[in-house]
């Protein structure tokens, strides 16, 4: 009898047992006992020994405050509030997503209080200096590894509400609000978006006027499209908000300004003349209470205008503190790109966008940590899960031993390393910010936020599929994270809009350099001053893996696209189109250019990180990862072929090299994900003993 016949008989026996059974529980144990079962072998026992020091690699990746991160992981592990569950003999922490939206929100708030009580937020609003900022960012990373809702709830309060007070406010606001924010005496939110206007903040319709008789501002929602929308914290908990509104003084619109407004008392009662409604259930992030707000001529004291760049005197005169044209230029250059000719440009507007930069920095960082979680789970599973055998009765093959599976996961791993370095660079840039750096921070944070969050969504999707059906179980995290993190593509700057701003800023640099006949300086465009790189027609393996070749081809693509983009925009203008129209029509080149800028900038952060490491095994692995990052990025962007930067023969050589690099990195896969330093408890059961985690004796689903 052939084996397929045996299988059919076996299945028939099982099915008839099912149909005939009176008590299913009594049948299962005997069946389970008599049949051999697949057993789980931890990859640590089967994979080659560590080829490099994973602690050194983690130090490089996490970069700072590693002890504090581990302290916070432990703090979360010590409390039942973080919903520990035992599966397959291990403890896993994850919010209980079976809870209703309201329950999830209350649990998020309780977790905030627990972290507050244990001193996690100490100094977040009151300590100054790089180290204090880096500590805050490190702890937020660790919180986000547990749950996005918790990180966002905290992020809105500290980075958006608190950041707005720090950046837009002056001493009177700092003295009154920062300590109370740090101690959660008040709970803040940030009301910028409206139903009718999101990306286009300059078009918001909320209106504020000034009453010099009482010394009060009057905030009003004049129509339904002006209702504040998506405001994190507004639906349940926030007591105060920053309201963004047009400021009308003596009948003249002075543009968008920010005001502090109370929306609830300390007992949670909504303030007079304020109406609040819920945004409802979302595809993720249901532990955050996003709400809508209407203001019915709400009166607030004059001092509640955040007045770092503009003020209104008691008798109602409008005063702007941005007088210096150079200073104006810095603020202006932050936000020039998008709407410059669509709306009357407001010099002060750019300054108002400063706190959003911190949001983009934290989003870029957290996107990479989620990719690390997804890859840790998918790679560990691929090192313990087998499917099909190559020979008749041979053992089934480990998923990660299939070259196709390596090709799916390992390039994403290399990209995650590259983008991890990029996120660290962005963080350093942000922490060390000076007025001269504002433009660079704006452009780099826009590009990295978009590229890193897109990468994260793609990585999570691939990891979800790589785990097969198990990837769909919420407890295994990887699939669920897609819904939780999708919003990162939209909030604090929609990715597509941000990328437009990047290419528009590059165009601005180009026009300015050409007009002044001066070399390019800043934004990494200095390579434009050098002769055009020449790419060898024969691409050998060693050429493809050389930093010089990789750098040359990224620079070549960026310079050529910038030249073409500037040429196309100028041509459209010569044909009679406005500058804005010419830009909008040239969107295809703009998209290619934005990506070219980001890829080149990310690549440079990788080479810098690699250069900082002494010769040895860590550096050797980084060199493989860097090559895989560079080559797979080139392979995936059709622009290299479209514009003729590569021939089809060269493209084929790159493809072969990508496959070779995947084979070479395969033995290091476990060590590369272990270096991410994410505690086991924050991964899912599927990453460990998935057989035992799913045994009949293992409790609930
Ligand atoms: C869960 C969640 C939480 C949020 N929290 C807050 C908060 O706490 N406070 C707050 O103020 N806001 C918050 N937001 C709002 C968020 O910042 C906005 O959703 C975001 O800015 C996008 O605005 P929009 O939704 O109106 O989309 P739109 O601006 O209408 O964009 C819709 C689409 O149009 C495209 N588009 C827009 N302009 C252009 C253009 N010029 N050219 C080409 N395409 C364009 C965009 O790429 C996008 O695909 C939150 C949103 C969500 C979903």
Image (spheres, rainbow, N blue to C red):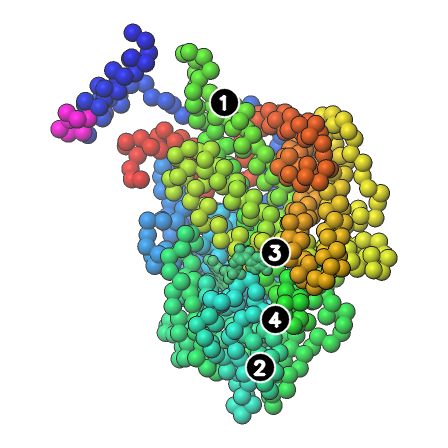
| Residues at marks 4 and 1, CA–CA distance in whole angstroms | 56 Å
| Mark 3 / mark 1, whichever is N-terminal | 1
Q: Is residue 205 visible?
A: yes
Lower sequence index among marks 2 and 1: 1
Horizontal relation, residue 557 to residue 166: left or right = right
Within 8 Å: ligand 1 and the Cβ of disc 3? no
- Name the one closer to the observer, 130 or 340: 340
Q: Earlier in the sequence, mark 4 or mark 3?
A: 4
Which residue was labeled with disc 3? 498
Whether residue 56 is in magenta: the answer is no
Please name whichever residue, 497 or 380, is drawn nearer the observer in this view of the structure: 497
Provide the residue designation for mark 1: 46
Crowd rating for badge 2 (residues with CA inside 10 Å; few <14, some 14–19, many 20+):
some
Nearest-to-viewer mark from 3 and 1: 3
Which image quarter: residue 500? bottom right
Q: Is residue 141 above or below residue 25?
A: below
> Which mark's residue is nearer the viewer, 2 or 1?
2
Q: CA distance from mark 4 to mark 3?
A: 22 Å
- Where in the figure is residue 274, as x and y percent of width and height? 41, 76
Secondary structure category for the residue under label 3: helix
Q: Secondary structure at mark 4?
A: helix
What residue do we see at 47% from left, 52% from top?
148
Start-end of magenta stretch: 18-24
> Can you give x and y, in whole percent of width and height, for residue 343 in the image?
63, 70
Q: Is residue 43 above or below residue 501?
A: above
| Residue at image mark 2 | 248
Q: Position of residue 395 (x, y in %)?
A: 43, 16
Counting residues from the N terminus, which is met first, the one under dot 4 or under dot 1?
1
């Amino acid at each position: 009898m052939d084996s397929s016949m045996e299988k059919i008989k076996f299945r028939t026996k099982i099915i008839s047992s099912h149909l005939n059974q009176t008590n299913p529980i009594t049948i299962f144990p005997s069946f389970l006992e008599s049949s051999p079962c697949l057993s789980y072998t931890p990859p640590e026992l089967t994979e080659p020994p560590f080829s490099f020091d994973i602690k050194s690699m983690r130090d490089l990746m996490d970069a700072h405050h590693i002890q504090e991160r581990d302290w916070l992981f432990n703090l979360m592990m010590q409390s039942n509030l973080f919903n520990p569950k035992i599966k397959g003999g291990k403890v896993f922490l994850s919010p209980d997503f079976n809870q209703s939206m309201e329950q999830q929100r209350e649990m998020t708030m309780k977790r905030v209080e627990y972290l507050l009580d244990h001193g996690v937020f100490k100094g977040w609003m009151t300590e100054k200096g790089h180290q204090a900022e880096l500590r805050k960012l490190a702890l937020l990373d660790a919180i986000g590894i547990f749950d996005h809702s918790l990180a966002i709830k905290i992020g809105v309060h500290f980075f958006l509400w608190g950041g707005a007070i720090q950046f837009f406010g002056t001493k009177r606001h700092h003295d009154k609000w920062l300590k109370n924010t740090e101690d959660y005496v008040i709970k803040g939110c940030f009301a910028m978006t409206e139903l009718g206007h999101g990306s286009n903040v300059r078009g918001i319709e909320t209106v504020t006027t000034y009453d010099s008789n009482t010394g009060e501002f009057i905030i009003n929602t004049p129509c339904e499209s002006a209702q504040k929308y998506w405001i994190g914290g507004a639906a349940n908990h926030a007591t105060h908000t920053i309201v963004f509104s047009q400021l009308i003084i003596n009948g003249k619109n002075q543009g968008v300004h920010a005001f502090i407004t109370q929306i609830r008392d300390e007992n949670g009662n909504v303030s007079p003349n304020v109406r609040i409604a819920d945004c409802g259930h979302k595809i993720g992030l249901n532990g955050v209470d996003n709400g809508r707000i209407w203001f019915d001529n709400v009166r607030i004291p004059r001092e509640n205008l955040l007045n770092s760049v503009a003020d209104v005197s008691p008798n109602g005169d409008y005063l702007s503190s941005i007088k210096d044209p150079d200073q104006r230029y810095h603020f202006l250059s932050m936000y020039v790109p998008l709407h410059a000719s669509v709306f009357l440009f407001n010099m002060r507007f750019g300054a108002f966008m400063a706190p959003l930069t911190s949001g983009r920095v934290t989003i870029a960082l957290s996107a990479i940590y989620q990719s690390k979680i997804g890859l840790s789970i998918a790679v560990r599973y691929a090192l313990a899960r087998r499917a099909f055998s190559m020979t008749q009765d041979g053992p089934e093959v480990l998923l990660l031993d299939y070259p196709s599976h390596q090709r799916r996961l390992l390039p994403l791993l290399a990209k995650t390393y590259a983008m991890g370095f990029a996120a660290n660079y962005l963080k350093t840039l942000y922490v060390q910010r000076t007025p001269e750096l504002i433009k660079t921070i704006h452009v780099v944070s826009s590009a990295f936020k978009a590229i890193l969050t897109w990468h994260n969504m793609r990585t999570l999707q691939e990891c979800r599929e790589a785990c097969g059906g198990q990837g769909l179980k919420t407890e295994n995290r990887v699939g669920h994270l897609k819904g939780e993190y999708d919003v990162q593509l939209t909030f604090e700057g929609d990715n597509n809009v941000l990328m437009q701003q990047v290419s528009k800023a590059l165009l601005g640099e180009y026009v300015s350099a050409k007009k002044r006949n001066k070399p390019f300086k800043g934004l990494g465009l200095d390579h434009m001053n050098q002769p055009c790189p020449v790419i060898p027609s024969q691409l050998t393996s060693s050429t493809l893996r050389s930093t010089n070749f990789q750098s040359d081809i990224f620079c070549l693509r960026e310079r050529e696209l910038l030249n073409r983009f500037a040429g196309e925009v100028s041509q459209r203008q010569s044909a009679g189109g406005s500058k804005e129209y010419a830009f909008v029509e040239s969107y295809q080149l703009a998209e290619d250019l934005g990506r070219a800028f980001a890829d080149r900038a990310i690549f440079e952060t990788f080479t810098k990180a690699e250069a900082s490491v002494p010769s040895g095994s860590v550096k050797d692995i980084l060199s493989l990862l860097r090559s895989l990052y560079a080559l797979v990025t080139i392979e995936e962007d059709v622009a290299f072929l479209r514009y003729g930067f590569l021939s089809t023969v060269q493209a084929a050589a790159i493809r072969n090299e990508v496959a070779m690099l995947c084979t070479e990195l395969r033995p290091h896969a476990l060590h590369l994900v272990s270096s991410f330093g994410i505690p086991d408890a924050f991964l899912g059961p599927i990453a460990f003993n998935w057989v035992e985690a799913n045994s009949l004796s293992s409790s609930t689903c």
